[in-house]
């Protein structure tokens, strides 16, 4: 009898442990099927209405946007363009007109375009001339380097020459006098530099004559010098300074250095010989 009671009690206790337990927490049900070594295994249960909402949220964004646009009032007016235009505001109409003008710009007449281009060329030329003097060829190269049309550049150069803003004769004379006084350049080197700047041979000869034959009485030392007495005296002063710098060298070396110095500056052999004679004599 005791054994029967003990067995019945054990079976009842085991069935009690197998009864499922339900817990509700924020519309979510957790179900435990039973105990296994005093531990619980929760299983998440999702109701049907919640799963439908999640499926809607998982739909692609583009699909939802197209459905919303298809069901909008504006899409319903697509079949009738007049009714659709009734919803257009004045601001939208102004924006449409502006976009149409931007897409189809009005072309300016050819004369106005060329006039504005020439004004730009004149402005650039004046800015360049404000910095320093230019010959006609130098200024033309500068303006063409700015990608201006050749016709506009030629027109501006011709206009500036007629107004006296560009004068190659005065430029050649000023350049020759500057190179002679600051660097002791001779006629030959000054002539070569003026040719590179676009000065004609006639204007270059006039400028060189004005600089090196500037005596008031018009007398030259010699017809082969092509230099006035004042210019020769100035050259002798500069040559004597160079002669004294190499006083420690031998006479032949000093003589070779002086010949090289005078030739580099563009003096002919008659001038070089005259300067050497004066330096060797000490006069």
Image (spheres, grey):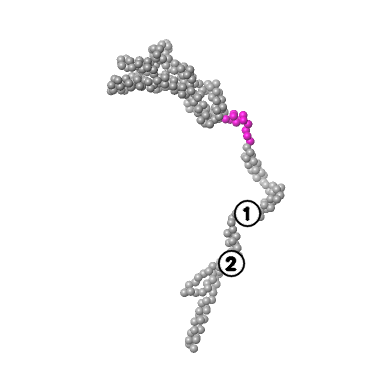
Residue 261 sits above or below residue 222 on the image: below
Identify the residue shown where x is 42% and y is 16%: 212
Magenta extent: 106-117
The residue lying toward the viewer, choosing from 200 and 283, is 200
Question: Eyeballing the image, is 238 above or below 144?
Answer: above
Q: Residue at x 42, y 14 (%)?
A: 213
Q: Tag 2, which secondary structure? A: loop
Q: Which residue in the structure is indicated by mark 2?
A: 47
Q: To which residue does mark 1 refer?
A: 66
Secondary structure under the numbered disc 1 in the rendered image = helix
Q: Quadrant of residue 243?
A: top left
Q: Is residue 17 visible?
A: yes
Q: CA distance from mark 2 to mark 1?
A: 29 Å
Q: Is residue 244 visible?
A: no
Q: Quadrant of the C terminus?
A: top left
Q: Which mark is residue 118?
A: none
């Amino acid at each position: 009898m005791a054994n029967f009671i003990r067995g019945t009690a054990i079976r009842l206790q085991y069935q009690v442990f197998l009864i499922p337990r339900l817990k509700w927490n924020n519309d979510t049900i957790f179900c435990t099927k039973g105990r296994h070594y005093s531990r619980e295994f929760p299983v998440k249960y999702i109701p049907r209405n919640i799963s439908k909402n999640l499926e809607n949220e998982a739909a692609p964004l583009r699909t939802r946007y197209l459905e919303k646009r298809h069901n909008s009032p504006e899409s319903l007016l697509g079949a009738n363009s007049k009714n659709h235009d009734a919803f257009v505001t004045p601001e939208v109409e102004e924006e449409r007109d502006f976009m149409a003008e931007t897409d189809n710009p009005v072309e300016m007449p050819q004369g106005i375009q060329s006039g504005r281009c020439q004004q730009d060329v004149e402005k650039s030329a004046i800015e360049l001339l404000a910095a320093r003097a230019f010959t006609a060829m130098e200024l033309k190269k500068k303006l063409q380097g700015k990608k201006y049309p050749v016709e506009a550049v030629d027109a501006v150069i011709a206009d500036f020459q007629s107004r006296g803003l560009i004068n190659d004769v005065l430029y050649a004379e000023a350049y020759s006098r500057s190179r002679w006084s600051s660097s002791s350049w001779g006629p030959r080197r000054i002539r070569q530099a003026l040719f590179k700047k676009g000065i004609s041979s006639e204007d270059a000869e006039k400028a060189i004559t004005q600089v090196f034959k500037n005596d008031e009485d018009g007398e030259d030392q010699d017809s082969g010098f092509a230099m006035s007495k004042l210019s020769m005296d100035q050259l002798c002063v500069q040559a004597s300074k160079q002669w004294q710098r190499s006083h420690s060298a031998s006479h032949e070396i000093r003589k070779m250095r002086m010949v090289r110095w005078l030739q580099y500056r563009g003096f002919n052999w008659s001038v070089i010989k005259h300067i050497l004679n004066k330096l060797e004599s000490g006069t």
